[in-house]
Image (cartoon, rainbow, N blue to C red):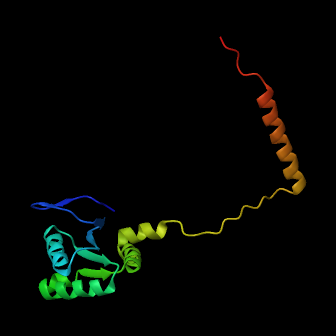
Amino acid sequence: MKTEEWTLERRIRVDIALQRGKRLIASEICSTSNAGQEVSHASRRFEAGFTDIAIVCKSQLRLTRIQQEIEATLPPENVNRVGYYQLEEFIAQLDDWARQDPAGGELERSKPRKREIRLQSKLSDDDRSRQEKAFLEEIARAMKSPGPSPS
């Protein structure tokens, strides 16, 4: 994940830029901007070379308005490359994108998944007690012995 400015002919600021393989996604977090501003943002992101745009918003009503404005304004080949998500949907979509990308999907599948960890000792209670006693005696001896004498 990258959060930097992307450059074409001018500096472009993106809320979140994601890149894996050939896919470059501009993620726009909408909290105060209106639909017209988001259309302008989307156009600039495509001009800057982003392959996809994810518009993330808390309000489904706002997402619908933005989608309607984008569909009425942008060319059809760009409209199909814009996704509209509420936060939970966007997080799920990130996982889907990672799994669909051959190189990125392989990386995601290779990561460790939730596993059950068992912390049971194979020692009997008597053996464990003897081992603990030996460790404690060793620590006590180490604490009693004088350190190296100063030169």
145 on left or right of 27: right
Pick the residue in front: 42 or 125.
42
Quadrant, the C terminus: top right
- In this image, 71 relative to 112: left or right? left
Q: How many labels does the image show?
A: 0
Residue 43 quadrant: bottom left
Q: In which quarter of the image is residue 140?
A: top right
Residue 126: image x %, image y %?
90, 53
Q: Residue at x 39, y 78 (%)?
A: 96
64 or 117, nearer to the observer: 64
Which quadrant: the N terminus?
A: bottom left
Q: Residue furthest front?
A: 32
Q: Residue at x 80, y 27 (%)?
A: 144
69 is higher (above) or lower (below) than 120: below
Compared to residue 138, the image places residue 86 above or below, namely: below
User: Does residue 70 appear left or right of residue 9 in this picture?
Assistant: right
Instruction: Residue 85: give x, y in percent of width and height.
Output: 33, 81
Q: Name the residue at 47% across, 70% down.
A: 109
Residue drawn at (38%, 72%), measured in percent from left and top? Answer: 98
